[in-house]
Image (cartoon, rainbow, N blue to C red):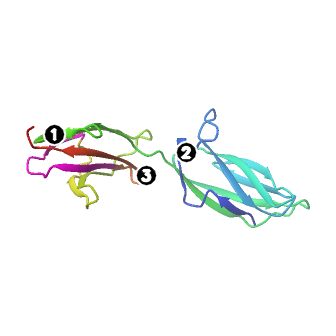
């Protein structure tokens, strides 16, 4: 029976992990161990991938995850005599995290009284956004929620009563599988020069 060392079962792979972007789907390199001199057969999406096991008992092969979502990959070992091992199943999830851009306020810039927090959000897999959180904290403090509205793309933030100093804003979005996060340091300064 093959032992899969990487990726781990349940791993989430995205286009960023694609080892050969010229091919359809996402190409994933699988590494593991099996009987020396044998071959490892992997079946994913109805396609077969064969890798030879080295004399040290190690194999490495590339396979294609054809579809967005959970992709079961079934592995077995074929020895020189034609014997086949029990199957080992590895489930990999193909999912790209939402693309998140925070436009304002800009990093390190000062804001006062009222400030618009403005962002853009899209999911390349066309998954619905299931969670969004815009939060702030004083440097080193605990984050406080400003909004969790998944449909929002801006937030009018009244900082009139805030103490002067360095703050962080954190924007997170999820498609239910992967999370994108942007953290930005800003300065709140309500004092006239």
Distance CA(mark 2)–CA(mark 3): 16 Å
Apparent side of residue 58 relative to residue 81 in the rendered image (left or right): left
Q: Which residue is label 3 attached to? A: 178
Circle 3/circle 1 CB separation < 8 Å: no
Question: Which residue extends farthest right?
Answer: 81
First reached walking from the N terminus: tag 2 or tag 3: 2
Residue appearing at x 62%, y 60% in the figure: 90
The span picked out in magenta is 153-172
Q: Does 16 sit left or right of 55 as displayed? A: left
**Looking at the image, do the residues carrying marks 1 and 2 touch, with CB atoms under 8 Å apart?**
no
Looking at the picture, how far across and down is residue 127, in whole percent? 40, 45
Q: Nearer the viewer, mark 2 or mark 3?
A: 3
Q: Position of residue 84 (x, y in %)?
A: 81, 63
Q: Does dot 3 land on a helix, a strand or a loop?
A: loop
Whole-angstrom CA distance, mark 1 to mark 2, is 42 Å
Mark 1 surroundings within 10 Å by alpha-carbon count, few (fewer than 14), some (14 through 19), many (20 or more): some
Name the residue located 43 percent from the left edge and 38 percent from the top edge: 124
Q: Which residue is mark 1?
A: 115
Q: Percent position (x, y) of residue 112? A: 13, 41
Q: Is residue 174 left or right of residue 8?
A: left
Which label is found at residue 67? 2
* Secondary structure found at label 1: strand
- Residue 101 image offset from top left, x and y in percent: 34, 38
């Amino acid at each position: 029976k093959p032992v899969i060392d990487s990726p781990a079962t349940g791993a989430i792979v995205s286009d960023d992990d694609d080892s050969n972007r010229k091919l359809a789907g996402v190409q994933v390199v699988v590494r593991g161990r099996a009987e020396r001199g044998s071959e490892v057969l992997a079946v994913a999406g109805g396609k077969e991938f064969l890798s030879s096991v080295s004399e040290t008992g190690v194999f490495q092969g590339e396979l294609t995850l054809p579809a967005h979502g959970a992709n079961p990959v079934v592995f077995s070992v074929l020895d020189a005599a034609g014997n086949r091992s029990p199957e080992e199943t590895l489930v990999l999830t193909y999912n790209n995290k939402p693309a998140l851009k925070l436009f304002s306020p800009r990093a390190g810039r000062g804001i006062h009284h009222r400030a618009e927090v403005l962002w853009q959000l899209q999911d390349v897999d066309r998954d619905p956004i299931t969670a969004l959180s815009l939060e702030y904290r004083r440097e080193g403090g605990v984050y406080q929620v400003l909004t969790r509205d998944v449909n929002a793309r801006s937030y009018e933030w009244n900082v009139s009563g805030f103490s002067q100093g360095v703050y962080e804003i954190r924007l997170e979005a999820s498609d239910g599988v992967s999370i994108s996060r942007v953290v930005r340091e800003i300065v709140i300064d309500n004092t006239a020069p």
